[in-house]
Image (tube, rainbow, N blue to C red):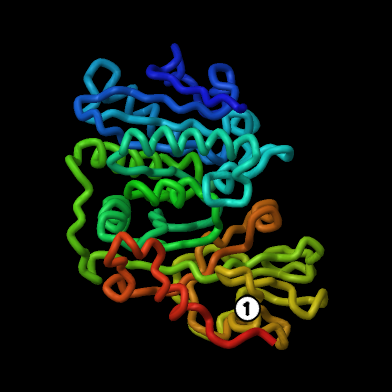
Amino acid sequence: MVKLTELDHLPDGLLERPASALHHSLDGPALIHLEGRNKQPLFVSVLQHGNEVTGWEAVRRLLKSHYEFDELPRSLSILIGNTRAARHRLRRLDDQLDYNRCWPGGQHEDSEPGKLFRQVTDRMRSLSPIASMDIHNNTGLNPHYAAINRVRPEFLRLATTFSSKVVFFTTPLGTQSMAFSKFCPSTTLECGQAGAVHGTDHSIGFLEACMHKTAIPTTPMDANEVHLFHMVATVRVPDDVLIGFGNVPTEIAFRENLDVLNFQELPAGISLGDINGGPPQPLLVTDIDGNDVTCQYFRFDRDQIETIRTTMPSMLTLDRRVIYQDCLCYLMERINVADHVEISDRDPLPESLRRSDRPGEPCI
Ligand SMILES: [Zn+2]
């Protein structure tokens, strides 16, 4: 049985360590409980991806600057994730699974990290946290935004405390926020690029706000209080397609500043780049059920990657390694909160959303 490291204090000197040095104190995931005035904890997950350091920077700066001598207003349960990958400033090591695909409900539940995260989930469920947040970075130019897995008032209230831009997603499976969304309001924070101070400041503000809340309100939100987007598809580049940016002779030459298109609503007819030979379908777009829906979003017959419907990308990146390892981007559609909010606890995932927003025509 894999044993979870669980502590009721910070190991000596931990707050002095940047993410890349945490491995000296913690040889793997650790769950650290710090007691505050209000005993119902706030759960914070950092460093599930070892190179996404904003969450740890926010936690350690907050604890050092504000609470070294003062009592926390609320108990904190901190999960420090992939310290081994953080040592090498990598998302994950080659021999590791992506930690944020290993939580209950995903396909890697029986893996070593899967068993650890089952223990974290069971333990936290027993402590009834007020809320859960999982802090990430991304590599392209993206605004800060919060993601949720259930469209419920308290999830929206929590997410909009961080940003008015909220993304609803149901895949990939096995994420921390999805596992915790079964028992507490839960959100994933995307804090822009790692190392940018603004992302750390923003996360600290959010952490402080959540620690001081007595409860997450469950009052419904107006449509004008939140920009809610549904993640409907994932765009990948097959391994054997050569890509570049700008004026280059690769099979796909994406536009140089591709990532400025993140969170822009693109009409039909927008080109993401030039095609110079290569396979007839150089991108693969899959919907939330894994179906190939490429031809509903793009055409390639004019030597361009051209949109054929209104869509909004997020997470577009210029980092080739990320594109091949993870994806080129996600595609989103704007949805109206009022039409999709869950009205009953017995309606765990809004079926209406999965049906009505799924791109209609089958791909030929
Ligand atoms: Zn991440």
Q: In this view of the protein, can residue 33 be seen by the observer?
A: yes
Front residue of this view, candidates 355 and 361 = 355
Q: Which residue is mark 1?
A: 293
Q: Residue visible at 75% across and 65% down?
A: 238
- Residue 222 occupies quadrant: bottom left
| Residue 265 locus on image (x, y percent) | 44, 75
Give the amino acid type for the residue marked by disc 1 in the picture.
Answer: Val
Q: How many marks?
A: 1
Taking 327 as reference, is 36 above or below it?
above
Give percent across and percent down for residue 123: 42, 32
Question: Dot 1 surroundings within 10 Å: few (below 14), some, or many (20 or more)?
Answer: many
Residue 333 position within the rendered picture, expressed as x and y whole percent measured from the top left: 44, 74
Up the image or down, 146 lies above or below 311; here it is: above
Residue ID at (58%, 27%): 28
- In the picture, which quadrant includes the N terminus? top right
Residue in the image at 74% along x and 73% along y: 282
In the rendered image, which quarter is residue 40 located in?
top left
- For mark 1, give the secondary structure: loop
Q: Nearer the viewer, residue 238 or 197?
A: 238
Would you say 338 lies left or right of 186 here?
Answer: left
